[in-house]
Amino acid sequence: MRARVQVLGAVAVIVDDETRAISSPSQRVVLSVLAARAERDVPTDLLVDALWPEGPPRTAVSSLRTYVSRLRGLLGDALVGTPGSYRLALEGVALDLADFELLLDDAATAAPGAALDLIDEALAMWRGPPFGDVGDVEPVRPVTARLEERWVTAREDRAAALLACGRAADAVATAEELVADHPLRERTWAVLVEALTATGRSTEALRAYHRAVEALAEAGLEPASELRRAEAVALEGEVAAPARRRVVLPASSFVGRDRDREELARLSAAWPLVTLTGPGGVGKTRLARTVAADIEHRFSAGVRSIELAGVDDGGQVAAVVADGLGLVVGAEGPLSALDAVGDLDVLVLIDNCEHVVGAVADLVGRLAAGGRRLRVIATSREPLAVDGEQLWPVDPLPVTGPSGGVQLFVDRVRAARPDFATDEEALGLIAGIVRQLDGLPLAIEMAAAAAGTMPLAMLHDRLEGELELPPLKRRDLDERQRTLKALLDWSLRLLDDEGRAMFGSLSVFAGPVTAGDIAHVSGVASPFEVLCRLVDLSLLQVDVTGEEPHFRMLRTVRQRACDAAGADLEVLRTRHAAWLLDAVTDADRRLRGPDERRAHDRLERLLDDARTAVAWAREHDQVCAVGLVGRLFLYAQSRLRDEVLGWAAEVVEHAPGSLSGTDGELALAAAAQRAINGGDLERARRLIDRAVDLNDSTADPLVYELLSDVLLFGGDTAPAREAARIGLATASAAGDAHGVVACLTGVVLADAYAGEHQAAARAMAEFAEPPELAPSDRAWLHYVEGERLLDLDPEPALAALHRAIAAADDVGNAYIAAVARVSYASVLSRTGDPSAARAPFAELIAHWRSHGDRTHLLTTLRNLVTVLDRLHMAERAAELLGAVLDDAVAPSFGAERAMLENLLDRQERTLGPAELARRMDAGRARSIDEAARLAQAWLDEPTPARDGGRW
């Protein structure tokens, strides 16, 4: 008996020319695993795992023996059993996969004719997917994949062998069939191109090459050398192709845009038309030319570049394009000539289409309809809006980071001044210049040219107030590209009266705003359509990632819009400030409730406009200025926006006569918060007292909450508790849920810090949580619960603080998140491995330093002393104690004071009185900022060895 195992398709066994199907799935699995590992011992455990991947039954081994026994009835002694394993021995049975691979190995070294016979014999064995329905079993899967790859390669080898044997037509048919199934096989495409060329069909060969490039580009691939050589052979036989032209690029460096280049190369293979859009000066033309140079090798006729900036009449476009393509225009006119070139293998680059966009759209539609090979890359400030168009917005260069706008500026300056220095100060000034110019490449090049005649600092200061730069003196630019004003005027000519009026109205907006916002200021009830027109012309940018579109004008464009607004500008600024006061008042109200997250996002977007409006209102409408900074208080305090608190400090200083009502109270509170953050508690107390006096002890609850904070920072726990209770009563009477939580926080913290833990617990227990709270208010409740338990029960305290941090992070409340992290790190440092507290404390110190918050920095450093002590850094701990224990800096009290005094006793025992005094004197000589900087360095030092194996 001679048996043959078949696995190149459904698993079967042929015995004496009779096919025996294996009906049992389990037997098919066993035979497949043995065949995949023929001539090797297969452990019993591997077979069991293959049969029962989810876990074997108790009878697994006995069941396996049964399956093997039944297979042995077909295979006889070819199925060998050894202790703990089984093996399929090929001396007793034939295996189709072994014969298949042996034939292909022999074909690889045979002459073309013999190779073709061997490959045909091997392919005849193929009956379908290897191993049939068990090809995905784990031990079999790698062999399945290998066999499928060899099968495809064998078909590829067959096409090449047919071509080598002079059977080019058969090679074409074989290769066409294979690329239909496997469009990413470059070698097959190369065989197809070569075979078509060999049959005298060079034009079809070039079309096949183009099809290959398209297929590869969709997968992000470029043609390799073999496929390009096949194209070159085809080109030698293509006598009708137009002369190849190359793209000429400027000699200066091309900075950034790597992603743009990659994506545009891919899109140009898949789409007949790719249009680069963006504002004037953003670099559309340079990018388009660079991409064209990147991909020109794909086109047998190269690239044809057509410039339309000098074409004023849309009726002239067809003739200009036909001339650019080198066509002979007959009596029928240019359109007739263009209709015949759609099948050319050429890339057409059409630059500056916006002013004749209708004519270009008609023309491109005709070109794209003519065939599959021609491709168009266009640049325009608005889309062409034709079928098959793929848009690619070109954004300004990044204004931060090592590449982008800063690198462009440096490159251009060094072209004229090779010794141009780029030290830290210079790079800072350049970054500021690039930001002022919105990252627009043309503006950056103009500024770089000006840097050749004036110091960087002077250029930076000049751009703060005036954006018009000296024109570029380059002969390769037309007049509209020499100045920003000329570029913008070019776009403005394309607007109607309504569009120009809206363009001027937008000059007062500094940040992203909605169509509804614009309607309030412009007076146009439904401005969306005209806004879209401005977006189309790249005079306005739009962000559609949120719940509704937000429109924004680049600063470089906005200055031209101010000119367009003319005499209406002051009226627009008045409306803008009034609109913004309404907007921030509404957002402030929602920031105190369940809609906090959206209100936060709204205020984040309004920040640039708030900066502009407050600056204007300080000079022209001080009542409005007071309202703006007052309604921004909660946002600025909770999001650690020192700049916004600084606006309040300036308004309070320069507009004392406008401080009245709730807005006046909150403006004073904002100024006081800034004083607290700066460590000036005396000034903060004076400002808060003024706020309380404004309304005869009926001030906003937040004023009393802040008064409680000031008193608490000063160690006056009883007055702090009383101030918070007044605010709590006021908020409760008004139904102000946010005010209730804020003032309850003050009550509980005052009790807890005074050591009156039962009173703190009662205050929490008496609180009836409203059904709808702002996420930040829930975070405050978690925080005060953690603070209350801090010295009583560390585990639940950590859990409460963790909840506070998570809730605060979720809505961007940086203030709660940071103070909760201080407490969390403090608990960790006292109860666990102090090394784990190193990183959190280092991050917190950096955080408070970056925000200039001296008060919370001091609290953090006082808690850090414990970490240094437990890390056996006694000298460091003593120095830090000297810096932070001085009541002249700010008094310490309650549990914190007791902790510091205990640490002081420990350091005296460790270092001795004399060394402790010396170390503390060194610490007292340092400011809090200096102590913080040194503490960060200490935290980077190696951890000393533990004493006796214990912390």
Image (cartoon, rainbow, N blue to C red):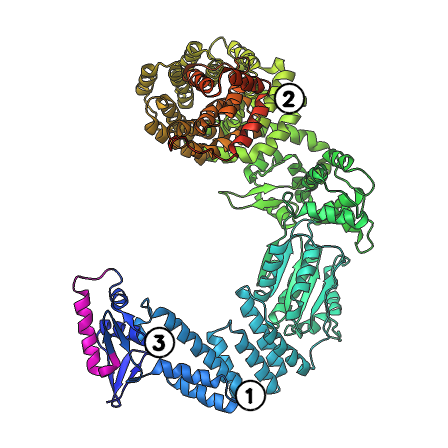
SS type, badge 3: loop
| Disc with the residue nearer the chain's start (3 vs 1) | 3
Magenta span covers which residues? 55-79
Q: Which mark's residue is nearer the viewer, 1 or 2?
A: 1
Q: Find the distance from the CA under tag 3 to the CA under tag 2.
A: 82 Å
Q: Is residue 94 visible?
A: yes
541 vs 18, left or right, is right
Q: Quadrant of residue 317?
A: bottom right
Numbered label attached to residue 776: none
Q: Are marks 3 and 1 in contact (CB under 8 Å)?
A: no
Is residue 71 one of those drawn in magenta?
yes
Amino acid type, mark 2 = Asp
Most foreground residue, 799 or 337: 799
Q: Position of residue 51 (x, y in %)?
A: 25, 67
Q: Quadrant of residue 24?
A: bottom left
Most foreground residue, 561 or 192: 192
Residue at coordinates 33% horizontally, 20% vertically from top-left? 764
Q: Mark 3 points at which residue?
A: 130
305 vs 640, left or right, is right
Q: Name the residue under label 2.
A: 621
SS type, badge 1: helix
Is residue 254 one of those drawn in magenta?
no
Q: Mark 1 points at which residue?
A: 164
Most foreground residue, 504 or 186: 186
Amino acid type, mark 1 = Ala
Q: Position of residue 443 (x, y in %)?
A: 73, 45
Residue at coordinates 55% horizontally, 63% vertically from top-left? 220
**Mostly what secondary structure, the magenta segment?**
helix
| Disc with the residue nearer the chain's start (3 vs 2) | 3
SS type, badge 2: loop
Q: Position of residue 520 (x, y in %)?
A: 58, 33
